[in-house]
């Protein structure tokens, strides 16, 4: 993960911690030797999985953190990421590509309005109308 992406993801994690939101990071990236890579693959590590997983009110929300536009272009999804994100959506989950903490705050505010005060689903595809 590029340093700028690292800083963005760290800020997002700090915010999620402050909000008391259930989440975890999925450290799929980085260099690994063949033995470790083989072991992780056998344990279920999949390429293309979003960087952060949020679970809220029984919902899966994946956040793919990408580098914001700076002196160089903003980060883009790989083909493998696009395909895995499509699998998540087909299974009823939700995935967002975010470039900043502000993006995450907007996503959370937008998606959380589809839950009533007792945290029950308002509809089956809760994100479809937001």
Image (tube, rainbow, N blue to C red):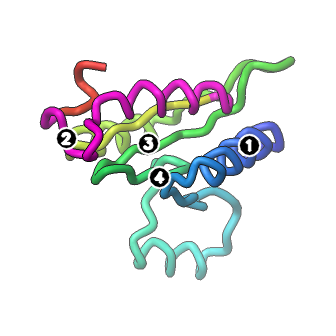
Mark 3 highlights which residue?
Answer: 80
* Sequence order check, earlier mark of 1 and 4: 1
Q: Residue at x 71, y 50 (%)?
A: 14
How far is the residue under mark 2 from the one under mark 1?
A: 29 Å
Camera-nearest label, 4 or 3: 4
Question: Residue 121, image x and y in percent?
Answer: 19, 41
Question: Residue 77, image x and y in percent?
Answer: 53, 32
* Sequence order check, earlier mark of 4 and 3: 4
Camera-nearest label, 4 or 2: 2
Mark 2 is surrounded, within 10 Å at the Cα level, by few (under 14), some (14 to 19) or many (20 or more) other residues, namely some
Query: Which disc number belongs to residue 11?
Result: 1
Residue located farthest toward the left when viewing the structure as drawn: 124
Query: Considering the image in quadrants, where does the C terminus appear?
Result: top left
* Residue 6 forms part of the magenta stretch: no
Question: Residue 12, image x and y in percent?
Answer: 66, 43
* Sequence order check, earlier mark of 2 and 3: 3
* Sequence order check, earlier mark of 2 and 1: 1
Q: Residue at x 50, y 41 (%)?
A: 63
Camera-nearest label, 2 or 1: 2
* Secondary structure category for the residue under label 3: helix
Q: Which residues are magenta?
A: 99-124
Q: Quick one: 130 or 116, which is closer to the camera?
A: 116
Q: Against 40, is 68 above or below?
A: above
* Secondary structure category for the residue under label 2: loop
Mark 4 highlights which residue?
Answer: 53
How far is the residue under mark 1 from the one under mark 3?
A: 26 Å
How far is the residue under mark 1 from the one under mark 4?
A: 15 Å
* Residue 104 forms part of the magenta stretch: yes
Q: Residue at x 23, y 24 (%)?
A: 128
Q: Quick one: 76 or 67, which is closer to the camera?
A: 67
Query: Which disc number belongs to residue 121?
Result: 2
* Sequence order check, earlier mark of 1 and 3: 1
């Amino acid at each position: 993960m590029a340093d700028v992406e690292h800083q963005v993801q760290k800020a997002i994690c700090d915010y999620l911690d402050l909000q008391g939101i259930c989440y975890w990071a999925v450290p799929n990236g980085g260099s690994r030797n063949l033995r470790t890579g083989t072991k992780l693959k056998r344990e279920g590590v999949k390429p293309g999985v979003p960087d952060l997983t949020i679970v809220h009110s029984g919902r899966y929300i994946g956040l793919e953190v990408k580098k914001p536009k700076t002196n160089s272009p903003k980060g883009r999804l790989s083909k493998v990421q696009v395909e895995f994100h499509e699998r998540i959506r087909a299974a009823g989950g939700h995935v967002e590509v975010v470039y900043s903490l502000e993006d995450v705050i907007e996503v959370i505010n937008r998606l959380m309005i589809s839950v009533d005060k007792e945290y029950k689903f308002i509809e089956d595809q809760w994100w479809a109308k937001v």
